[in-house]
Image: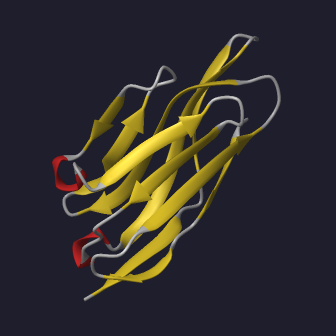
């Protein structure tokens, strides 16, 4: 299995910034896509941002221009820089990683989540 641990959540005022980080650990694995999700009305979780191993990114419309996802393949980490935060960004943010191992074996891991609260 591949374990994910998030960090960087907290309380910030409207218009402020936060940077979330997620680190993957395990043995003999390769991470493909990494992403951040948050709960949304009507769905279990909404995809906030996704980044491929090669660096291609996708964002939900509501965060485009405000959030930036990045990764460090050597360190198996992904980050979410969140700027111009709004109260509606308040949520638990979950890290997700699609991985593969040489067995062969593929899977998807989720982190425990980190709380982001934006006050008005």
Q: Residue at x 52, y 23 (%)?
A: 53
* x and y percentages locating residue 19 in the rendered image: 50, 61
Colour convention of the picture: secondary structure
* x and y percentages locating residue 94 in the rendered image: 48, 55
Relative to 30, is 42 on the left or the right?
Answer: left
Q: How many marks?
A: 0
- The answer to which quarter of the image holds residue 90 is bottom left
Relative to 13, is 55 on the left or the right?
Answer: right
* x and y percentages locating residue 37 in the rendered image: 39, 51
For the C terminus, the image quarter is bottom left
Q: Nearer the viewer, residue 22 or 27?
A: 22
Q: Residue furthest bottom?
A: 120
Relative to 72, is 9 on the left or the right?
Answer: left
Q: Nearer the viewer, residue 88 or 110?
A: 88
Q: Residue at x 30, y 35 (%)?
A: 58
For the N terminus, the image quarter is top right
Q: Residue at x 37, y 58 (%)?
A: 38
- The answer to which quarter of the image holds residue 76 is top right
Q: Nearer the viewer, residue 13 or 43?
A: 13
Q: Residue at x 67, y 17 (%)?
A: 105
Relative to 26, is 53 on the left or the right?
Answer: left
- The answer to which quarter of the image holds residue 8 is bottom right
* x and y percentages locating residue 28 in the rendered image: 80, 22
The answer to whether 102 is drawn above or below residue 10 in the figure is above
The answer to whether 14 is drawn above or below residue 26 in the figure is below
């Amino acid at each position: 299995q591949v374990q994910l641990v998030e960090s960087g959540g907290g309380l910030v005022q409207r218009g402020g910034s936060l940077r979330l980080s997620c680190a993957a650990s395990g043995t003999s694995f390769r991470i493909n896509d990494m992403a951040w999700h948050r709960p949304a009305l009507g769905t279990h979780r909404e995809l906030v941002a996704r980044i491929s191993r090669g660096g291609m990114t996708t964002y939900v419309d509501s965060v485009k221009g405000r959030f930036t996802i990045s990764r460090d393949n050597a360190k198996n980490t992904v980050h979410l820089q969140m700027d111009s935060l709004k109260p509606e960004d308040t949520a638990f943010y979950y890290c997700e990683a699609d991985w593969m191992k040489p067995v062969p074996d593929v899977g998807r891991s989720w982190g425990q989540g980190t709380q982001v609260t934006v006050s008005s």
